[in-house]
Amino acid sequence: MCRLPLFQLSLSVLVLTALVLFASQDHSGDKQNPIIATHELHQTVLLGKTSETKFELPQTMLVDLGGGMKMEFVLIPKGKVKMGSPPDEKDRNLFTEDFDAEKLHEVEIGKPFYLAKYPVTQEQYQAIIGKNPSWFCKDGDGAAKVKDLDTKQFPVEMVSWDDAQVFCKRLADNDKQKRKFRLPTEAEWEYACRAGTSTPFSFGSKLNGKEANCDGNYPYGTTDKGPYKERTTKVGEYGENKWGLCDMHGNVWQWCEDYYGPYDNDLKSTDPLRSVKYSKNRRVSRGGSWISHAKYCRAADRRWDAPDRQGSVLGFRVAFSLKE
């Protein structure tokens, strides 16, 4: 019979004792990050067994635009969402089409991604493009509506889908980390807007201009009329949704990457993107604007425009995916 040397026996006893003590402790209070990326960095081999090593992504991230200016991004977790609206949701399908534009269906966002906390502001657009085309600024046609107001942190508007593409490309070209900035897909936008909710708005079923910047003379879910400012407002003025995003309802319509079309079977159920023109050359925008009746600010509502159209109601926010 083989006997272990005394020092090996003592070491084994110490290891066994430590394991017993650890198992007897209550670890239920250990802190965990609420959003953990599903990115696998690599695999390591421990005691002959394969163990996945995961890393945690920051909940928010600041991207340098140069000149000391930053753009804040929020981590959006992967998950599923019911896009569209139920048949009994009031004022659904307002834009008459030959299809159900708000068909209720489930989609999956297969990977976490980052989305800008706010729509692109006038000062951010100026920093990247070198000009401010906004209607509501001191040199814009709507200057009288914002007299004596600092509009640097108002959303940029009078920008087309094409303009937004140029902004994203220049932002990427200037980025030291070589991130691929882009517009969010329509599915990503609605998923982030809802932030786990299923009501017409991420904050509930009522809107009259108090909860978001719209025309409060035409409320939704209530007969009480609210404010109508007749202009854009500083981003973030109305608070954030459950995932930390601001201005997902009202202020400016936000361009998405997709062409406008039906939610048909030709779109994937995971990470859908309508990248091929359906009929006319029209791109999607979401969220409603400062001039919109509240019904147009619903999470499921969809608008379309030609990609070169500019207007005082059209803006955008930026997204980027995690590197593979």
Image: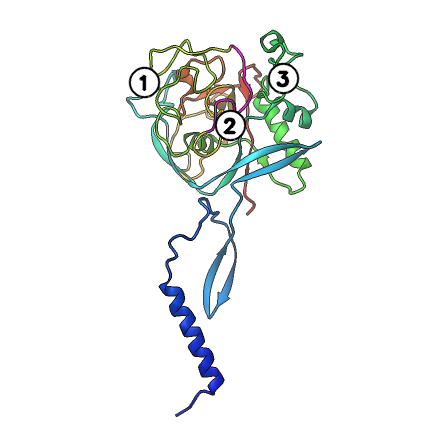
Give the residue at x 47% y 49%: 38
Which residue occupies the foreground of this view, 222 or 106? 222
Q: Amino acid at mark 2?
A: Cys
Mark with earlier residue (2, 3)? 3
Instruction: Single out the mark in the foreground, 2 or 1.
Output: 1
**Most frequent secondary structure within the magenta stretch:** loop
Confirm whether the magenta stretch covers residue 235.
Answer: yes
* Magenta segment boundaries in residue numbering: 230-240
Q: Could you say which disc has been placed on residue 256 in the image?
A: 2
Amino acid residing under circle 1: Lys
State the residue at coordinates (44%, 73%).
15
Mark positioned earlier in the residue sequence (3 or 1)? 1
Could you say which disc has been placed on residue 226 in the image? none
Q: Is residue 7 left or right of residue 20?
A: right
Q: Report which residue position mark 3 lands on.
A: 150
Q: Residue furthest top?
A: 144
166 relative position to 80: left or right: right
Q: CA distance from mark 3 to mark 1?
A: 37 Å
Q: Is 70 situated left or right of 37 in this image?
A: right
Image quarter of the N terminus: bottom left
Label 1 secondary element? loop
Work out which residue is located at the far left of the displayed protein and give it.
88
Q: Which residue in the structure is indicated by mark 1?
A: 90
Q: Is residue 271 above or below residue 30?
A: above
Q: Is residue 304 magenta?
A: no
Q: How dense is the environment of label 1, judged by Cα within 10 Å: few (below 14), some, or many (20 and up)?
A: few
Indicate which disc, 2 or 1, sits on the residue closer to the N terminus.
1
**Please, what is the three-letter code of the amino acid marked with disc 3?**
Asp
Q: Residue 197 appears at what percent x and percent y?
A: 37, 31
Q: Position of residue 158 (x, y in %)?
A: 59, 17
Colour scheme: rainbow
